[in-house]
């Protein structure tokens, strides 16, 4: 009896997953987050074009295609910085969700560069929001911080046009 239940459950699960991931929905971003992130579950669930994972190896696999790379600030420590720099060189938009200060987001939190200068640069506490960084040429790029409550719509509004610019 148990042998019949297990295959039935597996088939049910596969059908449910296939239905939930409608093939007409293209993936626009992959979001790495641990536990309760900066984006609400309700917001994420209403956007099937965003794939969510809490495992960095899965994250790397899911970002093999042309997608925006979203990292929750509570997961920044999981990211292999050298891998991220290589993805960034391919003109993929990189987003740090949870910090609206682009300098702190990319120079301190993700790239781990120590900022120096008169009086230093204060990164704590980070202003709420999100920051986006994308290469626009081999020699430069642009980054911007958005000091607003992060939502999927707000971030997609920034990253989707950047993705459309990737050849």
Image: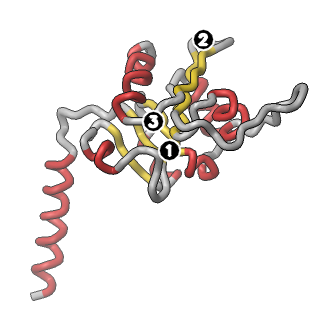
The residue where tag 1 is placed is: 60
- Quadrant of image for the C terminus: top left
Q: Residue 122 at x, y = what percent?
A: 76, 36
Asked which secondary structure carries label 2, the reply is: loop
Q: Is residue 10 visible?
A: yes
- The reply to whether dot 2 and dot 1 touch (C-beta < 8 Å) is no
Residue drawn at x 57%, y 45% is: 73
Label 1: few (<14), some (14–19) or many (≥20) C-alpha neighbours in 10 Å: some
The residue where tag 2 is placed is: 137
Asked which secondary structure carries label 3, the reply is: loop
Q: CA distance from mark 1 to mark 3?
A: 27 Å
Sequence-earlier tag: 2 or 1: 1
Sequence-earlier tag: 3 or 2: 2
Residue furthest out toward the right: 118
Q: Is residue 94 visible?
A: no
Task: From the viewer's side, name the closer residue of 44 and 21.
Answer: 44
Q: Residue 117 at x, y = what percent?
A: 88, 26
Image check: 119 left or right of 111? Answer: right
Residue drawn at x 22%, y 34% is: 25
Q: CA distance from mark 2 to mark 1?
A: 23 Å
Q: Residue 68 at x, y = what percent?
A: 44, 30
């Amino acid at each position: 009896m148990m042998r019949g239940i297990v295959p039935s459950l597996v088939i049910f699960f596969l059908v449910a997953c296939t239905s939930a991931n409608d093939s007409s929905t293209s993936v626009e971003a992959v979001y790495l987050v641990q536990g309760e992130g900066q984006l609400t579950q309700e917001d994420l669930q209403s956007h099937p074009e965003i794939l969510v994972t809490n495992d960095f190896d899965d994250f790397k696999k899911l970002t093999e295609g042309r997608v925006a790379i979203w990292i929750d600030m509570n997961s920044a420590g999981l990211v292999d910085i050298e891998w991220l720099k290589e993805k960034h060189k391919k003109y993929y938009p990189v987003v740090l969700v949870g910090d609206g200060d682009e300098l702190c987001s990319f120079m301190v939190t993700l790239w781990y560069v120590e900022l120096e200068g008169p009086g230093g640069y204060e990164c704590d506490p980070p202003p709420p929001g999100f920051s986006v960084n994308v290469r626009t040429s081999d020699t430069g790029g642009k980054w911007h911080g958005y000091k607003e409550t992060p939502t999927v719509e707000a971030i997609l509004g920034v990253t989707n046009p950047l993705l459309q610019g990737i050849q």
